Image: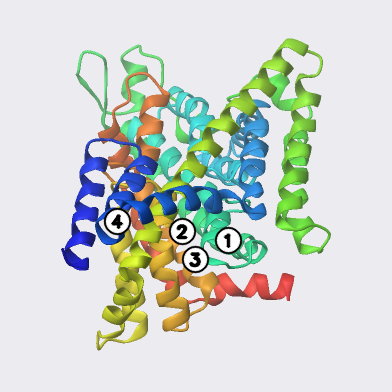
Amino acid sequence: MTTSVVVGLAVVVLLALLAARVPVAFALIVAGALGLTLLEGWSFAFTVLGRDPFSAVARFSLVIIPLFVLMGTFAKNAGLGADIFRILAHWLRHVPGGLPLATIMACAGFGAVSGSSVAAVATLGPVSIAEMRKYGYSDRVSTGVVAAAGTLGILIPPSIVLVLYGVLSGLSIERLLIAGIIPGIVSAAVYAGISAYVARRDLRTRDEHSTDRAGHAVASRADDVRAGMPARASEAELTATSIADPDEAATAPWRPWIELGALFGAVVVGIYLGWLTATEAAAAGAIVAFVILALRLGARRQLLLQGVRDSFRETVSVSGMIFALLVGAAIFTSFLVIAGVPQQFGEFAAGFDVPPLLLVALVLLILIPLGMFLDGFSILLIMVPLLHPLVVTELGFEGLWFAVLVVKVIELGLITPPVGINAYVVAGSMPGLRADVVFRGVLPYYLGDVVTVAALFAMPWLVTWLPSVMLD
C-alpha cells in the first residue's frame, strides 16, 4: 500500500469518525494510529502511542491554559460579565441601539478576562437576550449580536486560542497576546457600527409594521393610542430605561470596571512591564479573579464554596478537553510527518505560480469550510503544523500577522452554519430560540468579519505595531 493511499485512508477514517460524532480527540487518535500501523507496523505505532501523549502535554508552557480558564470561570461565577452588561446598558440609555452596543462592549470586556468565546456567550447571552426581548428587539437581532460579539473572546487577550497557537508554532506567547489587542478593538468597533445600524432598522420596522396578537397590522404608535392601546416605547425611550434595578445600577457603578481593569492589568500590564512571564501573568490573573469572587460572595459562605467548586469543575472539564485534543493532534501529526505530508504540502504549494500573498489568501480560505465542521482548537491542532511552516518559514511572512489572521478566520467558523458553535450556545441559552434565527442574525456580523480580515490582510502593521512598541 503506497503512502498516498495510506494518507487518504486515514483522512477518510478521520472524517467518517467525525461524521459519526466521535469526539475529535479520539477520532484523531484512531486515524493517526491506523495510519502509523499501515505505514510502519504495530510495533512502531505502539511506540508512538506510548511516547506522544506524554510529550504532547508535558510542557511547562501549557500551564497557562488551565490558569486562564480558571481565571475566566472565577470571573464568570462572580457575575462580573452580567454586571458589566447592566452598567453599560444603563450608561448607554440615550444612545440609539444602546442594548446591542452594551452587549458588544460587555462581550469585549468579558472576553478580555475569560479568553473563551463560549464562556462569554453562555454568561451574557441569557441576560442580554432577555432584556433586548423585553424592550422590543427581535430575536434575530438580539441573538445575532450575542453570537457574533462572543467571538471577541478568542482574540482579545488573554486568548486561549492564541496561547495554543504559540505552543504549536513556537511563537512568543507574550507577543501573540499583545498582537491580538488592536485587531480585537477593530473587530469590536466594526461590530458596534453594524449593531447600531441593525438595531435602529429593527426598531424602526417594528414601529412602522408591528402587529397585534391577533395578527392585525398596527401602523404606528399614534394608532396604538387612538385604539386605546398602551403606546409602545420609542427607541430613545427603550434605551432610557435602566434594565437593572435603579438601586443596583446606582450602587458602586465603577466597581465592576475596577475589577475588570485589575484582571486585564494583571495579565497585559504585567507582561508589558516585563514583571511577569505569560505563565506568571495567567497565575496572577487567576488569583485576582479568585479575590474578586471571594469579595463578592464572601458574606454568603455557601455561595462562595459553590462558586469555587463550579469554577474548578469547569476548569477541569475545559482543560481536559484541550489536553485530550493536544494528545490526539500529536499522534495524528506524527503520522503526517512520517508520511511526509508537510514536506509534500510545502512543495505542492510552492509549485503554484501565484504571488505569495494570493497563496496565503487561498490558505485562509481553506480554513473557512473547516470551521463549519470543527471547533477552533481542532483546526489549530490539525492545520498549524502544516500551514505555519509554509507561510512563515517557506514564504517568509510575519508569524504574528498570520496567527491573528488564522484566529480571525476561526472566529468566522464559530458563527458559520451548520456547526457554528456560538449560534447553538445562544439558541440553547433561552427557551424557544431556534438556531436558524441566530444564523440569520449573525449574517451582517459575518460580512463585517470578512471586511476586518481583509483589512488585517492588507495592513499587517495593525497586528505587528503594538508588540513591537510594547515588547521590543
Mark 1 or mark 4: name the one nearer the start of the chain. 4
Q: Amino acid at mark 2?
A: Val
Q: What colour scheme has been applied to the protein in the rendered image?
A: rainbow
Q: Which mark is nearer the camera, 4 or 3?
A: 4
Q: Say which residue label 3 marks.
A: 403
User: Of all residues shown, which one is farthest toward the right?
Assistant: 275
Task: Give the x, y percent position of residue 205.
Answer: 31, 37
Q: Amino acid at mark 3?
A: Ala
Q: Which mark is nearer the camera, 3 or 1?
A: 3
Q: Say which residue label 1 marks.
A: 180
Give the CA distance from mark 4 to mark 3. 36 Å
State yes or no: discs 4 and 2 in contact (Cβ < 8 Å): no
Side (left or right) of 238 relative to 333: right
State yes or no: discs 2 and 3 in contact (Cβ < 8 Å): yes
Q: Say which residue label 4 marks.
A: 41
Above or below: residue 216 compared with residue 181: above
Residue 407 - label: 2
Q: Disc 3 on helix, strand or loop?
A: helix
Q: Amino acid at mark 1?
A: Gly
